[in-house]
Structures are given as structure tokens and as C-alpha cells.
């Protein structure tokens, strides 16, 4: 169950949050070759001075930090495409300049992802972990 956490230093409309989360889940599913039912997205809207990033040319244009906890096994190309999709979506929806975004990926074995009725397996091509697993306690 990937947990994709976005911290931004500006307020956003509720409808944009819903749209953004849907697009992020779609990007993740396509690029990482998996379903969407197990994807968690967190969006934290902080104050203008709550984030500081030395690489940001214009901090007033918005800053975004992304922490993505994902299951291991994806290729370097998949991970890079995912990061670039996150950066592009932040720019598309909220005009955050690419140089103002910092993405950190943390890879975990499947058993680090726990639900009430199951433990996720390691990632495999084309899987949908919630649809593919029998329920167990």
C-alpha cells in the first residue's frame, strides 16, 4: 500500500485536492503497474514559511516535498518516471516550479504494508494486491 505524502506551503481548494489525489493515484497505477485500491495519498497544506528548500529559485511560487513509501522491486526507470509525474502534476494543478519540488522515495518489503485483513506481498508485475489476495487475518 503505497503512502504518497505531499507537503505544500500554500492553501488549496477542496475540489483541487480531490482532483490531485485522483491524478496521483492514476499516475502511480500506470507507471508502477498495479491497481489503485491500495494507494494512500496525504496532502498537507502548510503555511508559506513552514517549508524551506535551498534549491527553490522562487520560494514564493510554492514549495513541495514528497515522501513516497513504496514496495520494493520497481525498476529505476519506473521510479524516475513516477517522480517526474509527481513534479509535473504539482506544476499542472498548482503551478509549483519543478525546481521547487523535492521527492524522496523509501522502499519497503511487502510485509511492511499492513491492512486490517491482510499483509501485502512483495510487488510483482501487473498485480493488484487487494484484488489478488484472499482475505486472511
Image (tube, grey):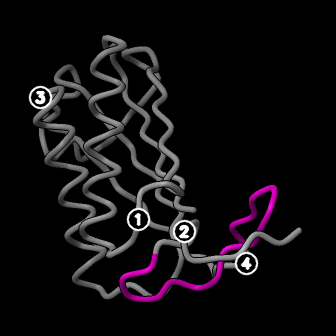
Which residue is the site of mark 4? 111
Percent of width and height locating residue 102: 32, 51
Direction from residue 116 to residue 62 in the image, left or right: left
Which residue is the site of mark 2? 131
The magenta stretch spans which residues? 112-127
| Disc 2 from disc 4: Cα separation | 17 Å
Q: Nearer the viewer, mark 2 or mark 4?
A: 2
Kindly identify the residue that appears in the image at 54 percent across and 54 percent down: 3
Q: Nearer the viewer, mark 3 or mark 1?
A: 1
Percent of width and height locating residue 94: 18, 26
Could you tell me which secondary element the residue under label 3 belongs to? loop
Badge 4 crowding class, 10 Å Cα cut-off, few under 14, some 14 to 19, many 20 or more, is few
Percent of width and height locating residue 55: 23, 47
Badge 2 crowding class, 10 Å Cα cut-off, few under 14, some 14 to 19, many 20 or more, is few
Q: Are marks 4 and 3 in contact (CB under 8 Å)?
A: no
Q: Is residue 134 magenta?
A: no
Amino acid at each position: 500500500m503505497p503512502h504518497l505524502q505531499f507537503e505544500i506551503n500554500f492553501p488549496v481548494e477542496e475540489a483541487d485536492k480531490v482532483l490531485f489525489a485522483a491524478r496521483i493515484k492514476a499516475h502511480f497505477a500506470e507507471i508502477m503497474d498495479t491497481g489503485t485500491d491500495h494507494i494512500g495519498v496525504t496532502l498537507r497544506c502548510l503555511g508559506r514559511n513552514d517549508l524551506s528548500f535551498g534549491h527553490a529559485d522562487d520560494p514564493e511560487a510554492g514549495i513541495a516535498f514528497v515522501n513516497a513509501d513504496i514496495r520494493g522491486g520497481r525498476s529505476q526507470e519506473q521510479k524516475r518516471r513516477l517522480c517526474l509525474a509527481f513534479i509535473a502534476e504539482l506544476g499542472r494543478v498548482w503551478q509549483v516550479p519543478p525546481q521547487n519540488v523535492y521527492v524522496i522515495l523509501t522502499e519497503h518489503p511487502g510485509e511492511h504494508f499492513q491492512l486490517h485483513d491482510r499483509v501485502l506481498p512483495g510487488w510483482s508485475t501487473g498485480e493488484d494486491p487487494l484484488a489478488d489476495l484472499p482475505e486472511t487475518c
